[in-house]
Image: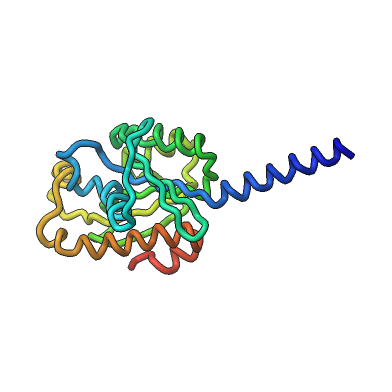
């Protein structure tokens, strides 16, 4: 009887742990650390997470491989991560915190810029190539899969031939800045929807919005 009870208790604990892990989400905003990158197009992942932290009155703490904060909403725990490894090694920080916090792959969301989308366009995908993005390339390498959720924020491709790097690492222009706050608000709503309603409903509701 005692053995059966221990076995049952062990099973119950495992079920509870699994249920708890399903309520935890890792939201990884991509960007480069340092003041000179803060307002660049390539740092939109950081900027969206900073917006959430500011509006929810939570603060980031510098821990191993990144800046971390936690947002709790309706029984869900969102761990917001800004890797401090620089863009090209984003996967290292992501994998470390996924393993440490026991985050299921389906509860991961990577927030990144996308040259192929018009400015401010939002698009969530559950799989896809890295599209030449070095941050996504490293994440794909560390996860050993292309099947992970990513939230792409359009920065458009309004640059002349050979000027891609300068454009991506350039700061928002006046027109973009005037629209950015509204876009950040919608982006924050999208991330909360991902945790509360799931990726499919979020895609249907926000893609192209």
User: Looking at the picture, does residue 16 appear above or below residue 97?
Assistant: below
- Which residue appears farthest toward the left when viewing the image? 174
- The residue lying at 38 percent from left, 66 percent from top is 206
Q: Is residue 102 visible?
A: yes
Horizontal relation, residue 148 to residue 61: left or right: right
Q: Quadrant of residue 33?
A: top left
- The residue lying at 18 percent from left, 41 percent from top is 37
Of residues 118 and 180, the one nearer the viewer is: 180
Q: Quadrant of residue 104?
A: top right
- The residue lying at 22 percent from left, 61 percent from top is 181
Q: Is residue 127 visible?
A: no
Looking at the picture, how far across and down is residue 92, in whole percent? 40, 32
Of residues 20 and 84, the one nearer the viewer is: 20
Looking at the picture, how far across and down is residue 126, in whole percent? 47, 53
Of residues 149 and 11, the one nearer the viewer is: 11
Q: Quadrant of the C terminus?
A: bottom left
Looking at the picture, how far across and down is residue 93, in whole percent? 39, 34
- Which residue appears farthest toward the right when viewing the image? 1
Q: Quadrant of the N terminus?
A: top right
User: Looking at the picture, does residue 22 appear above or below residue 190?
Assistant: above
Scheme of image coloration: rainbow
* Mark count: 0
Of residues 46 and 153, the one nearer the viewer is: 46
Looking at the picture, how far across and down is residue 195, in whole percent? 47, 57
- The residue lying at 42 percent from left, 59 percent from top is 192
């Amino acid at each position: 009887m005692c053995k059966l009870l221990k076995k049952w208790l062990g099973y119950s604990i495992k079920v509870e742990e699994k249920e708890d892990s399903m309520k935890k989400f890792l939201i990884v905003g991509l960007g480069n650390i340092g003041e000179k990158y803060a307002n660049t197009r390539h740092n939109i992942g950081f900027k969206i997470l900073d917006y959430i932290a500011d509006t929810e009155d939570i603060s980031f703490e510098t821990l191993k491989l990144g800046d971390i904060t936690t947002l709790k909403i309706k029984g869900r725990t969102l761990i917001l991560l800004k890797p401090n490894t620089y863009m090209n090694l984003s996967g290292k920080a992501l994998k470390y915190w996924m393993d440490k916090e026991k985050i299921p792959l389906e509860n991961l969301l990577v927030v990144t810029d996308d040259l192929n989308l018009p400015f401010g366009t939002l698009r969530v995908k559950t799989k896809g190539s890295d599209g030449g993005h070095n941050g996504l390339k490293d994440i794909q390498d560390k996860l050993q899969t292309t099947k992970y959720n990513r939230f792409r924020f359009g920065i458009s491709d309004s640059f002349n031939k050979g000027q891609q790097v300068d454009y991506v690492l350039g700061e928002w222009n006046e027109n973009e800045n005037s629209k950015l706050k509204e876009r950040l608000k919608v982006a924050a709503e999208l991330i909360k929807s991902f945790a509360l309603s799931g990726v499919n409903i979020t895609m249907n509701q926000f893609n192209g919005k």
